[in-house]
């Protein structure tokens, strides 16, 4: 009854108690009145009055009788007459004077009678007190007179009786009224007291119920405390044990009886931690907000009763006890937990090591397979250029096809290995989605044409222009899907449909659909094709050369980008592979158009170029001279310093890696030369594009940075900046200007020069590939690999071998970081890329290379 | 309040009377006729007759009080009942007091205490005539306490007393 207590409380506080308080004085007053009435009753004289009244009559009759006897006797007993007269006189005196009869004397009839009787008595005194003979003679007369009073005497009794009856009636009714009042008040008080006692019974029941509830809670608590595996120690403010639970007894090996009152520090804290323990205790008990929250658990070492040290997990909670502050210590023996953790960690490490070993194995094996395979393919190419009959040509072609397939498989496995080792990271860049897709379509159109298939792309609905994503990965995904589509479509169409969608899951705002009109995929196969090593069927695999890894890789890459991939297909009609990917729409980059049309420097400058690689130096000279600048070329740092300290150039382009003194050292030297030589702007001229390195350049005293290969727009921009005296350090990533650069080189160089440098580049490339072919990590070491890559990369870019240059860059970074797996993966990929690059560049030569 | 002051007044008078008693006793006549007969005292069947002087010789005490039978406050002088019984060396439980008109009443011996009733023989310094409820009258100090203003006590206040029977 949750509502009643308040009602009860209200009645108790505002009704019953005041009622009792008000009634009690009333009760006392009434009690006094009753007492008085009762006292009156007790001391009532009614009986005495009646007795006296009746006695008057009796004594009157006695007197008459005595007079009768005296009259008829010869010798009358006169003394009797006198005695009875005195008795009657005494009695009547009471009626006349007695306090008792004061009220009755108010009644006129009564008073008159008393007066008459008294008058008779008084007038008789003379005779009564007179001589005997006179008395004797007067007796008849006395008798007559006395007899005459009889009716009056009688009326005395009747009147008195009537009066006193009335009086006692009045008294009784008064007493009755008083008693009634008393009863009413008493009943009221009784009711109020009854209500109060009801309330107190109720309150008592409540208290008892609460007590029982408390007892139950206590019992529960006791059960919990005694059965929990958590050791609980209650200590007082001084750190002395007050209570232990069963778990604490087992954990620490003490019993409550033996340790009660002893310091917790002496019992379980190892001696070397005792100081910290005391400090912690003091901090815990300090009033204020420094108190530790009890939730924080810390790991500590504790000592058991038998001296054994055990690891425990510990939490402290201050509490208020009856006799002051308490500390409740929750502790748990975590030996088992720690063992389990150690085992788990060991198992995890083993598993990781296994995984790593697997990835390493894959990478190494793939590399080991690729190297001889490259040899095979190279020799096959050589064989195909010898005199062969028709059958032999077919065989060689078949062998080459098989070899390339095998190479493709190995490359896929390498990709997977790279994924598994977690080396794939996203590199976001800003690009134009439409241009990008157009490039994809352009690059695949030849491939499609061989299958008599057309390929196109287009937006469905409004499109997006500039976006931010990982372009390389996106390219890999699309090439895979488009490649598949072309592979399985003969005399049909492949189209890439792009549509903006409302982001639902994640932030995928673009859906790309690669639609082909090819052979399609059966429903059963649709669920499997994204698994590793899954293809539609083995026969088909052989026919179309699938590894079963392509879609598995694509799926991984899509997931890496935060997107989803799926397929819908009807066998015989075609397939739709859809991708939902997140693209961050961005505005057109500010420098995009500026880059497009950088102005040539208005005035000719004198420029010192320090460059040890002849090809690069040559290209730089051509580019700069075409813009009208005066060029001085030096081959190393020493020469650069020598030139720069005798002639004041407008700007110095300083290669970083040079034999002898490198670019950084040379810059520092120049900066220490006397003015005006030391103030010449120096631009770093390097293939190094890592951001941390540009910082390094600036620290060495350089003013700017131009990436290799030297590109006209960038060079012009930098020179313009020199003229404007505003040189921002700029890290520009040369983004595959395949055709542009190739054309630049061709444009700059005449055919002979081009051929010479190209031959040199191809020779360097072959040399590198040869060096890398056999266990390069051991024979060359990371450092050499990195420097070789660096050297060749700049030249590669010059000839537009962007992919090869990119691979070299990756390998260089990996080698610099001594990353074995990535290095091996990159090395493994190089020969393929090199073969393509070589195949693309070789036809540009006018003459065949001189046989070596 | 009135009762209280009246009461203390009465008490003062009462005490003063005790002090005044010996002088009063000395002036009384010694050869008066017997006024009280006592039976059942030390020797059974023996009647002791006491004169006013005999009574006066035992002890005298005054009680100033009103009564229901008289008008106003009076000074009663007499021998205290306890002194009388002590004088008579009475053992027993009850006294039967008998009046001239043979009215008899039982008085328990426990009433005979200091501060209890007296056997009065004078009112306002004068002997009490038989015609005015004399010569002996048992008077309780009625005004002193409500204990003495009960029906029972009134019935024991016997007047025209002339005989006491000691009952075992």
Image (tube, coloured by chain):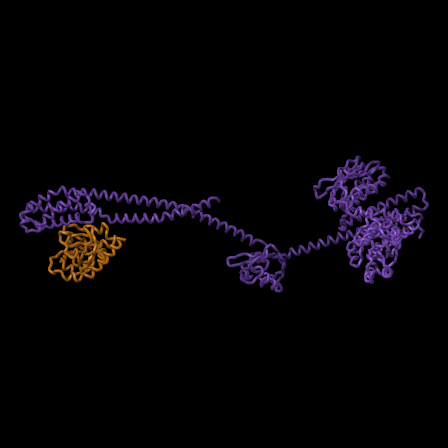
Residue A128 can be seen in this image: yes
Asked if residue B156 lies left or right of residue A291, the reply is left
Asked if residue A634 lies left or right of residue B44, the reply is right
Query: Which chain is depicted orange?
Result: B
Chain A tint in image: purple
Residue sticking out furthest to the right: A387
> How far across and down, in percent of the image, does residue B157 sit?
19, 52
Q: How many numbered marks appear? A: 0
Res. A818 image quadrant: bottom right
> How far across and down, in percent of the image, does residue A32 sit?
31, 49
> How far across and down, in percent of the image, does residue A846 sit?
93, 47
The front one of A613 and A810 is A613
Residue B106 can be seen in this image: no
Residue sticking out furthest to the top: A573
The front one of B12 and A784 is B12
Res. A817 image quadrant: bottom right
């Amino acid at each position: 009854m949750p509502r009643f207590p308040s009602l009860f409380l209200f009645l108790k506080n505002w009704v019953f108690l005041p009622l009792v308080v008000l009634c009690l004085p009333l009760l006392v007053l009434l009690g006094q009145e009753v007492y008085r009435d009762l006292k009156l009753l007790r001391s009532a004289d009614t009986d005495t009055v009646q007795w006296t009244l009746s006695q008057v009559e009796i004594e009157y009759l006695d007197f008459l009788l005595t007079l009768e006897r005296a009259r008829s006797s010869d010798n009358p007993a006169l003394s009797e007459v006198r005695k009875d007269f005195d008795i009657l006189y005494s009695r009547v005196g009471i009626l006349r004077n007695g306090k008792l009869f004061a009220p009755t004397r108010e009644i006129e009839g009564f008073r008159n009678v008393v007066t008459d009787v008294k008058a008779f008595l008084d007038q008789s005194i003379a005779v009564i007190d007179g001589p005997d003979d006179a008395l004797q003679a007067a007796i008849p007369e006395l008798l007559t007179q006395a007899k005459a009073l009889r009716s009056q005497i009688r009326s005395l009794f009747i009147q008195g009786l009537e009066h006193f009856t009335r009086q006692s009636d009045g008294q009784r009714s008064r007493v009755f009224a008083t008693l009634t009042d008393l009863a009413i008040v008493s009943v009221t008080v009784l009711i109020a007291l009854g209500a109060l006692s009801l309330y107190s019974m109720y309150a008592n029941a409540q208290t008892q119920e609460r007590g029982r509830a408390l007892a139950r809670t206590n019992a529960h608590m006791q059960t919990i405390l005694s059965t929990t595996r958590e050791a609980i120690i209650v200590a007082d403010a001084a750190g002395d044990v007050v209570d232990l639970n069963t778990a604490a007894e087992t954990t620490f090996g003490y019993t409550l009886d033996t340790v009660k009152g002893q310091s917790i520090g002496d019992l379980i804290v190892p001696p070397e931690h005792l100081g910290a323990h005391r400090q912690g205790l003091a901090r815990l008990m300090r009033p204020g907000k420094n108190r530790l929250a009890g939730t924080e658990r810390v790991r500590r070492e504790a000592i058991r009763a038998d001296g054994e040290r055990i690891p425990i997990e510990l939490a402290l909670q201050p509490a208020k006890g009856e006799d002051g502050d308490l500390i409740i210590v929750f502790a748990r023996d975590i030996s088992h937990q720690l063992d389990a953790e150690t085992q788990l960690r060991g198992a995890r490490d083993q598993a990781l090591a296994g995984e790593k070993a697997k990835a390493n194995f894959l990478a190494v094996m793939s590399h080991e397979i690729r190297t001889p395979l490259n040899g095979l393919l190279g020799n096959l190419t050589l064989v195909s250029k010898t005199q062969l009959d028709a059958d032999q040509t077919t065989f060689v072609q078949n062998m080459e096809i098989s070899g390339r397939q095998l190479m493709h498989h190995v490359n896929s496995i390498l990709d997977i290995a790279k994924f598994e080792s977690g080396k794939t990271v996203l590199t976001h860049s800003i690009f134009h989605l439409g241009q990008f897709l157009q490039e994809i379509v352009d690059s695949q159109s030849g491939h499609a044409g061989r299958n008599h298939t057309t390929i196109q792309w287009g937006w469905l609905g409004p499109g997006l222009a500039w976006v931010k994503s990982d372009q390389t990965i996106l390219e890999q995904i699309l090439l895979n899907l488009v490649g598949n589509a072309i592979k399985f479509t003969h005399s049909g169409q492949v189209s890439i449909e792009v549509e903006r969608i409302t982001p639902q899951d994640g932030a995928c705002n673009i859906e790309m659909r690669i639609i082909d009109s090819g052979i399609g995929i059966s429903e059963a196969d649709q669920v499997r094709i994204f698994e590793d090593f899954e293809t539609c069927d083995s026969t088909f695999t052989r026919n179309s050369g699938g590894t079963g890894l392509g879609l598995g890789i694509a799926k991984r890459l899509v997931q890496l980008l935060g997107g989803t991939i799926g397929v819908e297909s009807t066998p015989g009609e075609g397939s739709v592979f859809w991708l939902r990917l997140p693209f961050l729409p961005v505005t057109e980059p500010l420098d995009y158009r500026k880059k497009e049309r950088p102005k040539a420097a208005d005035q000719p400058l004198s420029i010192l170029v320090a460059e040890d690689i002849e090809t690069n130096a040559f290209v730089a000279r051509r580019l700069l001279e075409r813009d009208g600048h005066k060029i001085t070329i030096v081959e190393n740092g020493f020469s650069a310093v020598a030139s720069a300290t005798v002639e004041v150039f407008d700007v110095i382009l300083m290669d970083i890696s040079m034999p002898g003194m490198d670019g950084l050292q040379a810059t520092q030297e120049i900066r220490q030369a006397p003015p005006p030589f030391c103030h010449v702007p120096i631009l770093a001229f390097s293939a190094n594009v890592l951001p941390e390195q540009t910082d390094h350049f600036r620290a060495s005293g350089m003013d700017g940075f131009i990436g290799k290969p030297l590109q006209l727009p960038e060079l012009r921009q930098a020179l313009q900046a020199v003229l404007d005296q505003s040189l921002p350090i700029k890290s520009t990533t040369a983004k595959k200007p395949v055709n542009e650069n190739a054309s630049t080189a061709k444009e700059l160089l005449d055919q002979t020069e081009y051929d010479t440098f190209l031959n040199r580049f191809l020779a360097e490339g072959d040399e590198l590939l040869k060096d890398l072919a056999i266990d390069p990590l051991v024979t060359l070491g990371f450092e050499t690999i990195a420097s070789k890559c660096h050297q060749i990369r700049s030249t590669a870019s010059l000839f537009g071998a962007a992919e090869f240059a990119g691979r070299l860059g990756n390998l260089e970074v990996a080698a610099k970081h001594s990353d074995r797996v990535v290095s091996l993966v990159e090395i493994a990929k190089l020969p393929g890329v090199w073969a393509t690059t070589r195949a693309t560049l070789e036809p540009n030569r006018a003459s065949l290379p001189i046989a070596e | 309040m009135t009762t209280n002051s009246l009461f203390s007044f009465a008490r003062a008078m009462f005490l003063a009377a005790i002090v005044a008693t010996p002088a009063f006793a000395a002036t009384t006549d010694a050869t008066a006729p017997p006024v009280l007969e006592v039976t059942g005292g030390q020797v059974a069947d023996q009647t002791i007759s006491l004169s006013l002087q005999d009574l006066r010789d035992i002890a005298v005490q005054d009680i100033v009080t009103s009564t229901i039978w008289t008008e106003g406050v009076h000074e009663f002088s007499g021998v205290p009942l306890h002194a009388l019984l002590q004088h008579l060396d009475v053992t027993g439980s009850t006294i039967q007091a008998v009046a001239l008109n043979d009215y008899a009443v039982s008085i328990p011996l426990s009433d005979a205490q200091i501060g209890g009733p007296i056997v009065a023989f004078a009112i306002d310094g004068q002997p009490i005539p038989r015609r005015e409820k004399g010569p002996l009258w048992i008077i309780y100090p009625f005004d002193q306490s409500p204990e003495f203003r009960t029906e029972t006590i009134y019935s024991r206040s016997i007047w025209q007393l002339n005989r006491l029977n000691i009952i075992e």
